[in-house]
Image (cartoon, rainbow, N blue to C red):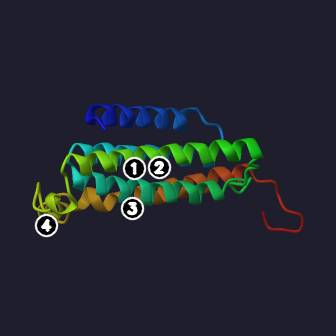
Amino acid sequence: MDPVFTVAVGCALVVISALAVVLLRKPVHTALGLLAHSLSMAALYLMLDAQLMAMAQVLIYSGAIVVLFLIVVTLLPSGGQEQLGAGRLATAVIAGGAVFVVFMAVLSSHLQAGVSIPSIFGVGPSVKEVGAPLFSSLLLPFELTAPLLLASIVTAIALWRRQEKPRAGGLG
């Protein structure tokens, strides 16, 4: 498969998933759009031979941030529950299959181009070179992200509690 075509399809997935994050109404669908966006960005980073950025994208955004969003969504009054009809389920399966096909196309184009997994080792900065500033000169900003995430969770809970109806016989 032509690498230019693969990059064009990857860019199209990034744009479509970004639009999904902005335009979808249900919070779980938005979080899934964010997951698709971050994974699409990771695929583009891999195409640019930026393996460290791709792994950071997967671990930080796809892993931690999307899970945090889903935890906050479960705190919403509806509890994150959504009704999924047969038509929507079929659409979700088709969309997931399309993402899988594009991922396999990217992987096969890399393999046909002669890029193998062992060839990426030793290219670019090492983990030690990237991690050294995080635990020296950038330690304070790195550590300040934890209270920032905690404040966002507390704010989400406070907004949820403001909308919650008082329970019969309860304290709140």
Residue 170 pos. (x, y %): 83, 68
Disc 2 to disc 3: CB gap under 8 Å: no
Q: Which residue is mark 2?
A: 100
* C-alpha separation, residue under disc 2 versus residue under disc 4: 33 Å
Where 156 falls versus 94 (above or below)? below
| Viewer-proximal residue among 24 and 144 | 24
Q: Amino acid at mark 1?
A: Met
Q: Residues within 10 Å of mark 3 (few under 14, many from 20)?
A: few
| Viewer-proximal residue among 36 and 28 | 36
Q: Which residue is mark 1?
A: 104
Residue 47 pos. (x, y %): 26, 44
User: What residue is at 73 percent from the left and 50 percent from the top?
Assistant: 82
Q: Is residue 106 left or right of residue 169?
A: left
SS assignment at label 4? helix
* C-alpha separation, residue under disc 2 versus residue under disc 3: 33 Å
Residue 67 pos. (x, y %): 51, 59
Residue 146: mark in rendering: 3
SS assignment at label 1? helix
